[in-house]
Structure formats: C-alpha cells, structure tokens
Amino acid sequence: MPVPIIIVLRRQLKYSWKNAQLIEDPDASRGLVNQIFNQSFTDESVPLHLILNGTNFQIKVWEALIKIPFGAVVSYEEVAVQIGLPKANRAVGSAVGKNPISFIIPCHRVIRKNAEFGNYGGGPTRKKAILGWEAAQMNFHARFNK
C-alpha cells in the first residue's frame, strides 16, 4: 500500500530542515492558506516571504517559475530561455524537480514542449488536477467578475 503524500511531504520537510521544529496549527496557518489558495486575480496581493534552500541555479529557476501567470503553462525550454540559458532544458527540469514547495513555486505550470505533462512530485494526476483547478478558477473569474 502506498504511503499517503502528506506523510511523504512531512518526511521530506523534516529531512530538508533537520533543526526546525515542525508544529501543525491549522488555526494559526488559516490566513496563509487562504492567501495561497484564494487568488484575488489582482497585482495587489500580499507577497509571501520564503526561505529556500537551493543552489544559485535552482533559485534562479524557481524565481522564473514564480513569474508564470496563474492558469498558464510554459515549457522547460521556455524557462531555460527566460533565465538566459537556452540550452539548459535538462538542468531546468532537474531544478524544477527539486522545488521544495511545489504549489507555491508553481512547477506544475511547466510541461514538455510536445505538450506532455511530464513528471511532478505529487504525480501526474495531481499535476493535471491543479492545472484543471487553475483553469476553472480563471474561467469562473472571467465569467462572474467582469
């Protein structure tokens, strides 16, 4: 029987931040969760301040991912071009795969240039679901918030 994804993610977090004390507090994190999952579709949203552990290259790729608009997709090649290294598709793919906070840094928005979804830490079904959710949010916003 496969291990639930939440347990895998907790283990990864504990491994990456060995000296951190992890405390689950839904009441304290509710505001942050709402900020992440309830997009306002404006440029006036409050920025999230993140502490990331990665190489300079990985950070550069993750910064490029943050710039991909909600509901959009780009190829690994497009990300490589954006960071100024057009031949670094594979390295970009590796950096995307090392993304420690895959929804906040939206690696799910990167697909292969042949339009295949490619890999995703939470699995291809989760990647498709997130992209579908974003498309639905965009459609809802376009229809009801004109």
Image (cartoon, helix red, strand yellow):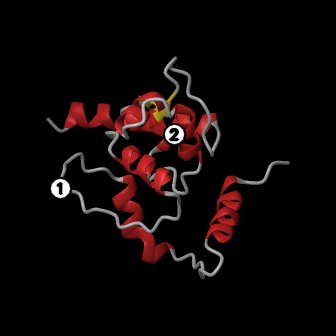
Q: Position of residue 142 (x, y in %)?
A: 23, 32
58, 45: nearer the viewer: 58
Residue that sits furthest to the right in the current view? 1
The residue labelled by disc 2 is 92
For image coordinates 70% across by 65% down, the residue present is: 11
In the picture provided, is 22 more to the left or to the right than 38? right
28, 113: nearer the viewer: 113
Q: Is residue 3 above or below residue 110?
A: below
> What amino acid does circle 1 point to?
Glu
Chain-order first, disc 2 or disc 1: 1
Mark 1 residue element: loop
The residue labelled by disc 1 is 44
For image coordinates 59% across by 45% down, the residue present is: 97
Residue that sits furthest to the top in the current view? 114
Q: How many marks?
A: 2
> What amino acid does circle 2 point to?
Val
Please tell me in which quadrant of the rendered image residue 20 appears: bottom right
142, 101: nearer the viewer: 101
Q: Position of residue 114 (x, y in %)?
A: 52, 17
